[in-house]
Image: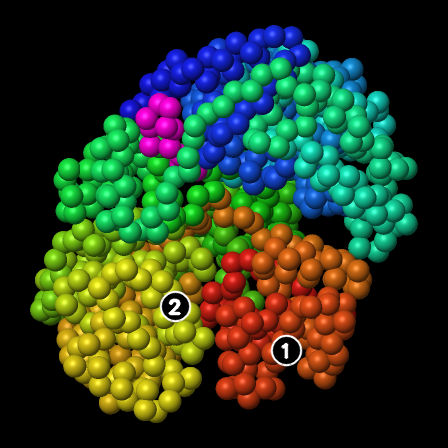
Amino acid sequence: MKIQELLSLYGESNGIQRLSKAINKANAKISVKGTIGSVDAIIAACIYHFNYRSQVFIFNDADEAKYFHSDLGNILEGKTVLYFPPSYKRSYQLETLENNQVLERAEVLNRLNQHLSTGELIVTTTEALAELVISEKDLTKNTYELKVGDTFDLEFFIDFLTEHHFERNDFVYEAGYFSIRGGIVDVFSFSNDMPYRIELNGDIIESIRTFNPIDQLSVTRVDRFFIIPNVQKDIDNTEKKSVFEYLSKDSIIWTSDVSLSVELLEKGLEKSEKSIQKILNKDEDIKHDIIEGFQAKDIYDVYISTSQLLKSIGSYALIEMGFRTHFKHDKVVEFNIAPQPTFHKNFQLLIENLKANQAQKLQNLIFSDSSRQVERLYTIFEDLDREVEFAPVYHALSEGFIDKDLNLACYTEHQIFDRFYRGHVKTRYSNSKIITLKELRELKPGDFVVHIDHGVGKFAGLEKLEVNGHLQEAVRLIYKNDDLLYVSINSLHKITRYSGKDGTEPRLHKLGSDTWEKLKTQTKKKVKDIARDLIKLYAARKSQPGFQFSPDSYLQVELEASFMYEDTPDQSRATTDVKADMEQPHPMDRLVCGDVGFGKTEIAIRAAFKAVADSKQVAILVPTTILANQHYRTFKERMRNLPCNIDYVNRFKTTKEIKDVLERVKQGKVDILIGTHRLISKDVQFKDLGLLIIDEEQKFGVAAKEKLKAMKLNVDTLTLTATPIPRTLHFSLMGARDLSVINTPPANRQPVTTELHAYNDELLKDAVMEEVERGGQVFFIHHKVKDIYEVADRISRLCKGVKVAVAHGQLEGDKLEDVMMRFIEGEYDVLVATTIIVDWTLAMPIPSSSIMLTCLG
């Protein structure tokens, strides 16, 4: 079924017809009851199609708002659904201004002010809506419009941007920057999530294009755009207004539990009052630019009051969702919706439910934006029960539901498979993603660089040169005898930072000589010689007989479909490569290289189960006891409902327990065995080993690797690493070992945020308590062992009820491992440790909800 068909079906329903008719009355107040799941977004989409009025959806929780924003955007294909966030990273804390969120706010205000679309759809939270904004009059006055064909006044342009706190830079990579390079002007306005590039012909604007700040390549052409300043920086010098004043009088407000909104706003205002006092008192941990630009004297210079919020909401046509209402209503519209049942990946239970729906004349719809997941469902049903009927809808929703009035069972595949669903988050660019340009900015005069055509030289800064009457920027390089080479910004790909033996300075090459060319030729010859030897080795390995694994069974499909997260393209490719290797008649020898958290373990799980499905055993070799325990729990959880026996050996097991495990391994009663160096001992004998998985191979010594060679002779081998040793990587790059690289981070992966503050007990307490209260854990790095226990006691006193542990290099190995293990298992909230934690965390997954605090003093 197509989404438009579903909307048409709902549009003709009695509930939607009644709601649409009622909301057309001036200042109508309507209560909508009985909805659950993503049906709210479908109802909102239908109402928008009936009358193209602006609509504002107010939520009390940011996550709830983002899920709804994602649902509405998926349902209304092609329609821009705006998200209006608060300006601050932390709720009601004015010292934590977030530039990307300010940009999104400015984008929404600009669209409302310029009337760029008929009927805007805005999803927001009570906190964001209560925050005062720049007035329409001041926003118009501070907006600069540029059109193709207009005359461009460069002097006015620079003055305008400088006055509004824009910074001139060599490169534009985030909002608030501009650059001028001859006839090309780049500017990153606060009105769009991409920067603009203006091309001039004399003083006439010839073209305007958006471009990607990562690779600086153009994306789309536009006829005009608006330069909007940072509205948060300018707001203190202008008249402040409520966001409601930007809305047209015929707008519709949707709310959920207005009484709770009022309660949360009251608590937030109290919290914000303390934040204002911290800024006014110039606390050491507040950034200087925030203190300097801050002019608010009390809370009502920043937010509207609760009474103003209620008055503003009540002055528009209003739809209150849910059973708890605040306003007196003209009409109540009820829907008969039930939640999607929970299946926990039990496909027999799912089949029974779908067939029961069919018997009750309910149409089964399964929502997914992944065609692969839908194909997996078809495969599973074909193997288990071909009588099951369902229609796929290729759009994602956050939560499924059953509509008993329309006889629809709308299920989401991520709930069926117990997969994590985050929705679609708008991509934001930041300088952390710039690679070449960022490295160039970090180079200092005197740093050695290598030019692919001219060899090693010294970086001497950027210089502006006149080329054909235009000023252009170039990189200045110094070579032997002080020869100079200027490299255009457009040829940056030819320059790399010099990397060699630490403490040894390279010799500079002479421009025009053949020394560099000879060196490149000799190097190429050596590479060819190595390649020739490796090809012989590779051919010999390929000729070795191995076990040819069968194609995927439906259980393999079920395992892969039940992965909680959406596969990244690289992860999917690596999985395909590994399984293809296993299905070959010669032994696999593949290296999977990817950063921590990029999904290497999931690939190992899929490969391991493929081996088990063909009655082969799997050995998983890891460098630490902690990682062995972590892998054991991960593998057990992922294969919980599958026919697979998993066990492990480590020092936490008694000699008798280990002997029992090894006996069962010998008899073939254990399918997957996980362990450290203990696995390569002589007394470990497998009945029929088919796959060896090595995690972090670089952490094993030479003796261990020699033993591994004997194990790997005719056994498929999969090596996982985030930091391959040069020899391993070299072998893979040269083809002696197959290589899969996972470069793509998981979808919507949150960036690591780093903040620098002076030590402050209150700040420490707030950070620790906030993290622990939301279910996270805290690493506290302290560099001195002599007073580390005093630091731990201090944290315990400041944060009542928080469980604190200590780890450092002077602890005995067993005790250190024990502390780390108990921290991983959640027995401690805070781990105070020396930098030894860095070595441990390289070999273990850091808890997903965690922050790291470092004491530099």
Q: CA distance from mark 2 to mark 1?
A: 24 Å
Residue 109 vs 694, above or below: the answer is above
Residue 162 vs 759, above or below: the answer is above
Q: Is residue 689 visible?
A: yes
| Relative image position of residue 731 (x, y in whole percent) | 29, 66
Secondary structure, mark 2, is helix
Q: Quadrant of residue 584?
A: bottom left
Q: Quadrant of residue 269?
A: top right
Left or right, residue 784 beside residue 587:
right
Specify the amino acid type for callout 1.
Val
Q: Nearer the viewer, mark 2 or mark 1?
A: 2
| Quarter of the rendering occupied by the N terminus | top left
Q: Are marks 2 and 1 in contact (CB under 8 Å)?
A: no
Q: Which residue appears at 59% of the width and 63% of the height?
A: 777
Residue 358 vs 654, above or below: the answer is above
Residue highlighted by disc 2: 633
Left or right, residue 691 beside residue 118:
left
- Residue numbers of the magenta segment: 399-409
| Relative image position of residue 742 (x, y in whole percent) | 37, 53
In the image, 110 versus 371, the foreground residue is 371
User: Would you say residue 105 sits in the magenta stretch?
Assistant: no
